[in-house]
Image (spheres, rainbow, N blue to C red):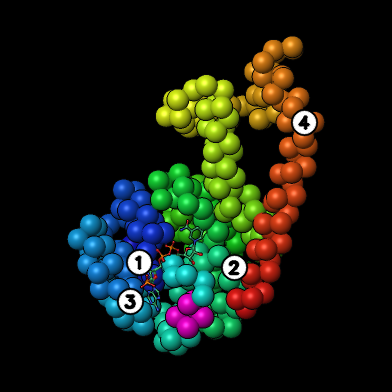
Amino acid sequence: MTAPRIGFIGAGNMATSLIGGMLQGSFKPNQLMASDRSDEQLERLGRQFGIHTSTDNAQLARDCDVLVLAVKPQVLQAVCRALPNERRAGQLVISIAAGVTCSSLAEWLGADTPLVRCMPNTPALRGQGVSGLYAVERVSDQQKKLTETILNAVGISLWLEREAQIDAVTAVSGSGPAYFFYLMEAMIDAGEQLGLPREIAERLTLFTALGAADMAVHSDVDSAELRRRVTSPNGTTEQAINSFTRDDLPGMVARAMQAAAARSAELSKELA
Ligand SMILES: NC(=O)c1ccc[n+]([C@@H]2O[C@H](COP(=O)([O-])OP(=O)(O)OC[C@H]3O[C@@H](n4cnc5c(N)ncnc54)[C@H](OP(=O)(O)O)[C@@H]3O)[C@@H](O)[C@H]2O)c1
């Protein structure tokens, strides 16, 4: 089988990260192409990666086997409706646009289109992303494997059984980086209040976050057990954890994530 050609519509931050990651993996520059309305953006991409670029979305859609939709959600409907009907038969379409449902995509692209909806997150820009993926029934196992190869170029990906779970993924990992940034901000401020120079409080906080995440990812026990193991009875960590518990940290997190998931569902309705 010849190597599939992957075309990106929208050559912004996400597409650039994906293309960069894919080229570090098993993909070759002559397999990848991108279109965008900005010549400047395309020139940069062509120079950086040596891939084919164009301002013609329709031609790109005719030329590739897999189409990755990487424009902002607000312009996606217009982009899809302007694509030619005579795209390749069975062409896989992967949408990374937040909040745009498969039923909207099917309406704009044709009901028989094999569609994958993907919710990536910003650490993909550093090759450390995590994506939730949902495929409609028409998507073959081979197309699912290819989707994984594309998304895993910038991190890891996980398949979901129901499309509605994308709202939960948005609340956990889509919006999640900001929750950790917020906690880091608070820890840096508190470290400064405890007498540390800000730069030192910042380095201590960031490397603690990185180290804790690395330990949790590579551990064979869960985060609760890791926490227990570093919380000695009557020690300093226990004092801090008791304070978090009195302030209902788990409840605060649950309420915040319910609000994020509800907003995600609402946005899908607005974009339909
Ligand atoms: N960045 C993230 O971390 C993240 C996370 C999850 C999901 N996503 C999703 O990923 C998608 C892309 O996000 P991004 O951050 O990469 O956005 P971005 O940097 O703004 O990239 C989108 C690109 O599409 C171009 N574009 C606009 N209209 C177009 C058209 N009609 N034809 C071709 N290209 C067009 C834009 O050009 P102009 O700048 O001229 O408009 C821009 O270069 C979004 O749908 C977003 O919801 C992103």
Mark 3: is the Cβ under 8 angstroms from ligand 1? yes
Mark 2: is the Cβ under 8 angstroms from ligand 1? yes
Majority secondary structure of the magenta segment?
helix
C-alpha gap between disc 3 and disc 4: 51 Å
Please provide percent x and percent y for residue 271. 60, 76
Q: Which residue is mark 1?
A: 11
Ligand 1 appears in which quadrant? bottom left
What amino acid type is highlighted by mark number 1? Ala
Q: Quadrant of the C terminus?
A: bottom right
Q: Which residue is mark 4?
A: 245
Magenta range: 75-80
C-alpha gap between disc 4 and disc 2: 34 Å
**Foreground residue among 221 and 31:** 221
Classify residue 261 as left or right of residue 14. right
**Foreground residue among 236 and 168:** 236
Secondary structure found at label 4: helix
